[in-house]
Image (spheres, grey):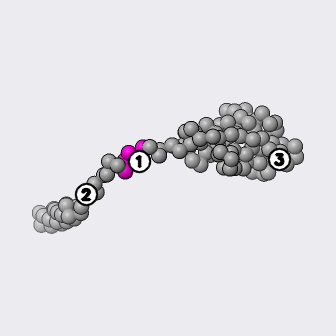
Amino acid sequence: MKNKTRIILSIISIISICFLCGSCNSPAKKTNTTEVAQVVEQENPYKDAEIKAVIIPSEDDTFGYDIYLYDAVLIHQPSRPGLSGNLGFATAEDAMKVAELVIKKIRNNEMPPTVTLQELKELKVIYIL
């Protein structure tokens, strides 16, 4: 029994030494402070961007929205996000509530700005039991 214990301890010691030696030989990556400063500066490119929502017609007299970043369409959403089917929102006001949520997420650099079913319920634009 003592021999087995010694063998196991020896193997564990050898493995530990191998791991330690292997990590000692690898060069440490140095962080360039200029790179860090650039990352901080570019952290949120949408904070002050020109972003607007335009309500669009959708199937069966429903409504969707387009989100514009400056003059280009960033998001084209003719249907209710996260739900099956092609129908949009029942009213233009409901579509605008969701579009405003999406714009808020973009401004917070949440990309992609996904909308959950829970958020749709909280905005009272869908009713699912």
Which residue is labeled 2 in the image? 28
29 inside magenta stretch: no
Spatial distance from mark 2 to mark 1, Cα to Cα? 21 Å
Question: Label 3's element?
Answer: strand
The crowding category of the residue bearing disc 3, from other C-alpha atoms within 10 Å (few below 14, some 14 to 19, many at least 20), is some
Which residue is labeled 3 in the image? 58
The crowding category of the residue bearing disc 1, from other C-alpha atoms within 10 Å (few below 14, some 14 to 19, many at least 20), is few
Please name the amino acid that badge 3 sits on: Ser
Q: Tell me if 26 is positioned left or right of 125 in this view.
A: left
Please name the amino acid that badge 2 sits on: Ala
36 inside magenta stretch: yes
Mark 2 vs 1, N-terminal side: 2
- Depth check, mark 2 against mark 1: the one in front is 1
Spatial distance from mark 3 to mark 2, Cα to Cα? 56 Å
**What range of the chain is rendered magenta?**
35-40
Residue 4 higher or lower than 36, as above or below: below
Q: Residue furthest right?
A: 60
Identify which residue is drawn at 20% across, 64% down: 25
Which residue is at the front of the view, 95 or 67?
67
Please name the amino acid that badge 1 sits on: Gln
Mark 3 vs 2, N-terminal side: 2
* Residue 100 visible here: yes
Which residue is labeled 1 in the image? 38
Q: Magenta residues: mostly which secondary structure? A: helix
Mark 3 vs 1, N-terminal side: 1
Rendering coords of residue 33 (x, y %): 32, 48
Spatial distance from mark 3 to mark 1, Cα to Cα? 42 Å
